[in-house]
């Protein structure tokens, strides 16, 4: 399968090398690309009309409330501490869930996540209401189908809330540590919670969660390899069930780091930090395929939630409830209204909560799914064939041949294409290979237009 890149592909890889921060797990490269080319002619169709299915599906509930918006975040976050607004938002989520109940009861909900934001900014009573509403949809075949996110401060200072979550049916909890350096956290507008993490872990264990995950971020502004090594040592000492090592993203209009950071870390920095983490965590007893950012103590687990496993690996359809939550089924991908109060108004009026919707050609959905799968360090042709009904190696014959020739992908005994050891730094180029021609041309034209403006 080894073959040199064509002249066109070689030029495209040169473009990707010059714009490496753009080529992340997130696809499309810019929202404007889909907005300009693939907006649904139906406008903002209600998810109640096009999401219903009798097969497997995933469910996500967005809770946007946070103490502050971190500079690396481009999610729809609301920093309100108004308990009444929190309660009314949960009311709206439950009404929205009830509106979808008739078809959800016919489907098999393979995984449920409550994310944000910081869902545990809600009070215990509201979290209990959410759990009670979600439990009937939980997949009995999965040992922890309901997952939720928290922070060290909340888990350390509100143990009764952790107990309430477990009693409400949440079996997995993910805690966003992000770093153990107070200065690093301060640089991204995040409150230092270093001294609270051990107490937080103790409270989570006492509550009886089946799986506890810790999130950390590498290649943060100013972060050194020594800083990262210190963070890894703290993680290992805490002994969580799984660890997610997010590579910091700088792309996107909603991400303050895009505006605040002039010197972005290069692919070599990401590669060195990931390779160091992979070696340390593997030696300490956590497992992952090379290239995966999710590490698990149990070798047979992926280290993530049932929801993300189904979404990123199996490409299952998913329903998103809450402000700016996304839904996808087949070729259609939608975003809800961005603001909290807009979402409340739409639900109260029994109206569609959709703000933006795209009808995508197969090439776009396939590219999106391949990039998601690479988050686990591999592409599984069998999963690809189940999702799309076509052969991965035929659809992506040239990109695959180029990736193999470059030494970035290797065929494994399980027939998956796996990221080659040491190739993490090449992920921006590898991802770029799987971009469809239309996306390549759009990005190149955008770059040419920006260059022309700069020269004028």
Image (spheres, rainbow, N blue to C red):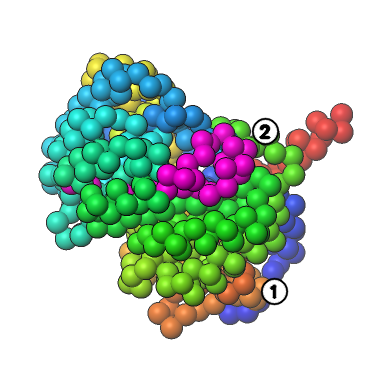
Q: Residue at x 55, y 65 (%)?
A: 277
Instruction: Please tell me which of labels 1 and 2 falls first in the chain.
Output: 1
Q: Are marks 1 and 2 in contact (CB under 8 Å)?
A: no
Q: Which residue is mark 1?
A: 4
Q: Residue at x 49, y 68 (%)?
A: 281
Query: Of 158 and 397, which appears nearest the observer?
Result: 158
Q: Which residue is mark 2?
A: 259
Please give left or right for residue 110 compared with residue 314 in the image. Answer: left
Residue 301, can we see it?
A: yes
Q: Residues within 10 Å of mark 2 (few under 14, many from 20)?
A: few
In the image, the segment drawn in magenta is 169-197
Q: Position of residue 10 (x, y in %)?
A: 73, 63
Give the Cα distance between marks 1 and 2. 38 Å
For numbered disc 1, what is the local secondary structure? loop
On residue 143, the disc is: none
Q: Position of residue 74 (x, y in %)?
A: 52, 36
Residue 63 magenta-highlighted: no
Q: Residue at x 44, y 37 (%)?
A: 358
* Image quadrant assignment for residue 242: bottom left
Residue 186 magenta-highlighted: yes
Q: Position of residue 222 (x, y in %)?
A: 68, 47
Query: Of 432 and 228, which appears nearest the observer?
Result: 228
Q: Residue at x 20, y 40 (%)?
A: 164
């Amino acid at each position: 399968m080894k073959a040199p890149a064509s002249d066109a592909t070689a030029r495209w890889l040169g473009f990707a090398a010059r714009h490496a921060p753009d080529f992340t797990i997130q696809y499309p490269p810019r929202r404007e690309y889909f907005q300009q080319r693939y907006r649904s002619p139906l406008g903002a169709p209600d998810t109640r009309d096009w999401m219903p299915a009798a097969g497997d599906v995933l469910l996500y509930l967005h809770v946007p409330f946070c103490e502050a918006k971190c500079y690396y975040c481009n999610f729809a976050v609301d920093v309100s501490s108004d308990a009444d607004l929190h309660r009314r938002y949960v009311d709206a989520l439950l009404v929205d869930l009830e509106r979808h109940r008739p078809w959800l009861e016919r489907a098999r909900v393979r995984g449920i996540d409550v994310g944000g934001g910081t869902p545990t900014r809600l009070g215990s009573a509201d979290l209990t209401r959410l759990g009670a509403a979600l439990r009937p949809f939980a997949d009995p075949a999965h040992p922890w189908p309901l997952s939720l996110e928290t922070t060290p401060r909340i888990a350390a200072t509100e143990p009764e809330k952790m107990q309430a979550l477990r009693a409400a049916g949440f079996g997995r909890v993910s805690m966003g540590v992000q770093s153990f350096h107070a200065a690093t956290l301060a640089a991204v507008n995040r409150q230092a919670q270093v001294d609270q993490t051990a107490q937080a872990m103790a409270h989570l264990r006492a509550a009886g969660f089946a799986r506890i995950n810790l999130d950390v971020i590498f290649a943060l502004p100013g972060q050194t390899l020594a800083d990262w090594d210190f963070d890894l040592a703290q993680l290992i000492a805490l002994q969580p069930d799984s660890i997610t090592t997010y590579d910091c993203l700088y792309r996107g209009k909603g991400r303050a780091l895009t505006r605040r950071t002039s010197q972005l870390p290069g692919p070599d920095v990401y590669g060195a930090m990931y390779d160091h983490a992979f070696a340390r965590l593997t030696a300490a007893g956590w497992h992952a395929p090379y290239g995966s950012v999710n590490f698990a103590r149990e070798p047979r687990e992926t280290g993530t939630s049932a929801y993300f496993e189904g979404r990123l690996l199996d490409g299952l359809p998913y329903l998103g409830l809450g402000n700016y939550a996304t839904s996808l089924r087949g070729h259609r991908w939608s975003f809800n209204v961005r603001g909290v109060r807009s979402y409340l108004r739409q639900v109260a009026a029994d109206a569609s909560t959709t703000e933006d919707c795209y009808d995508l050609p197969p090439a776009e959905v396939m590219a999106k799914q391949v990039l998601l799968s690479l988050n686990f360090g591999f592409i599984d042709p069998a999963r690809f064939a189940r999702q799309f009904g076509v052969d991965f190696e035929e659809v992506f014959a040239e990109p695959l041949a180029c990736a193999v020739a470059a030494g970035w992908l290797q065929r494994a005994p399980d027939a998956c294409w796996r990221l080659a050891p040491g190739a993490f730094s090449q992920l921006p180029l590898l991802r770029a290979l799987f971009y469809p021609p239309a996306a390549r041309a759009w990005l190149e034209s955008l770059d040419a237009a920006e260059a022309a403006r700069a020269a004028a």
